[in-house]
Each structure stands twice: as C-alpha cells, then as structure tokens.
Image (tube, grey):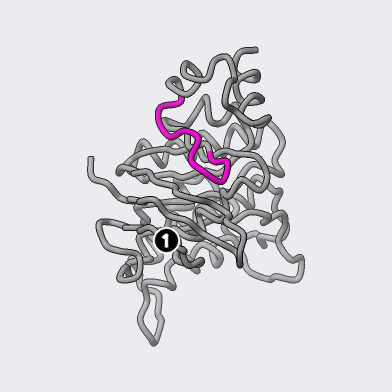
Amino acid sequence: MSIVIEVDNITVSYGQSEAIKNVSFEIQSGDFVGLVGSNGAGKTTLIKALLGLLPISSGEIKIFEQKIKQFNRWDKIDYLPQNIKSINPLFPATVEEVVFLGLLSSKKFPRHFSPNDKLRVEETLGYMRINNLKDKAISELSGGQQQRVLIARALVSKPEILILDEPTAALDSKSRDELMKLIKKLNCDFGITIILITHDTNIVCEYASKLMYLDRRMVFFGGVKEFYEKYNHGELLDEYGKHLISHQLK
C-alpha cells in the first residue's frame, strides 16, 4: 500500500508553547486510524497541521508524496470538525441540497450541477441510508441523522482521506454504533483512509486498525492489539493511557 501521509519530526507551537513536539508517523492508503489522547494532548492541533491550517515550527509533512506547502489537491481530503452539535433551525436547506454542497469545491466558475452530479448525490444518499430523508430540512433531523448527512456531503466528492473529529460524541449508543458501522464500511468498500479522533475506547478497539496515542509527543503508533500488549501494565502512560488499558481489560 502507498503512503498517503508522512509526518517527519514536526513541532507545532502557539507562541512560546509547544502544542506537539517531534511527532513522526506514516499513514498508508486504506488505514483506519483511531487518534486518542487526553484533552490538551494535541490531537486537533495535529489535524489542523495536516490540513495546512496551522504552520509547523519544524519538521516536514508530505501528503500524497508532496510537501504540504506545495500540495494543492485538497479535494482528495475531507474533514468533519468537532462540535457540529446541531444545525441552525433557521437554515432552510434540505438534506439533498446539503449533500450537493460537497461537490462545489470541484466546480469551476460558473458552478453548475450536471445530471451526473445528481446521480452521484442519489447514490451517496442511498449508500448512507438517508435517501428517504432527501427532501427533509436538515434542521429537523436527529443528531445521528445530521451526522450521516454531513458524512454524505464529504463522501460525495469521493475523497481518499476522511478525517473525523469526535463524530459520535453527541450520539446515543444505538446511533453511535450505526454510524461507526457505516464509517467502517466506507473504509472497507472504497479503501478510504480514515483518521478518527475519539475518546471512546470501544470505537478504537472495535473499528480501528491502528491506534495513534498522543500526549504532546507520540506515545504510540501501531496496531491496536500491539498497543494493549505493550502497555498492559500501564507503565510510562499518563492517566488517559491507563484508562485506555483498564477499559480494555474489563
């Protein structure tokens, strides 16, 4: 498999404070990476650096073998940020219209939608099992349904990398499980590389193929099973890492 993200010894700072330091890893095409760590460990900072939204103080990032400063194929990457808890009730768009918005980044001015675009949206709605909701206002949907719509909006542009920041945080257990099964299906059916930030150890154990554990520095990056075998006794881990281990051993 090819390397889609290569991070070499990067440091990201806010003023004089280092948010992450000397972080290195490689993510291969088709990986499903669970990114974990305590609050303030640098998870969102790392993602923003990967998306070119934060400058790095030192080190190097390559996306699809291009240095991030030269990289311009951002249509290959989609990002669902944290804290999309609800949609403004005054937002009038239907589910179908929201998913169409996912195609705008690939359109040149003047932006017009083609019959093929319409077909792609219909296929995406069907894949995400929300085609029955296409004419409903997105503000009328439940939290789980809204998350499916937002993932459909990302999926319709056919990204190769999908980054999700706590997508299940506001969902009940049933909605969480249904959404995670769909995300895993995207990973398996289309080979989309998934990076998922989560505090939910069950998600990491059940769905991710690799675990990235940050605590400002890289504590661990590798197979989920390998992590639990290596740190079974909890030495050298912060309180969050010990929580990961204890939760898995229950």
Give the quarter of the image for residue 41. top right
173 with respect to 195 (left or right): right
Residue type beneath disc 1 = Ser
Q: Main secondary structure of the magenta part?
A: strand
Q: Position of residue 129 (x, y in %)?
A: 52, 44
Query: Please, is residue 95 above or below residue 90 in the view?
Result: above
Give the quarter of the image for residue 137. bottom right
Q: Position of residue 91 (x, y in %)?
A: 70, 70
Q: Position of residue 106 (x, y in %)?
A: 37, 72
Task: Compare residues 85 and 226 and report the one nearer the observer.
Answer: 226
Q: Residues within 10 Å of mark 1 (few under 14, many from 20)?
A: some
Query: Please, is residue 49 above or below residue 147 in the view?
Result: below
Give the quarter of the image for residue 81. bottom right
The residue drawn where x is 71% and y is 61% is 87
User: In the image, which residues are magenta?
Assistant: 214-224
Residue 69 covered by magenta stretch: no
Task: Compare residues 199 and 184 and report the one nearer the observer.
Answer: 199
223 with respect to 199 (left or right): left
The residue drawn where x is 32% and y is 57% is 63
* Mark 1, residue position: 58
Residue 223 covered by magenta stretch: yes
Q: Position of residue 114 (x, y in %)?
A: 35, 73
Task: Compare residues 138 and 26 and report the one nearer the observer.
Answer: 26
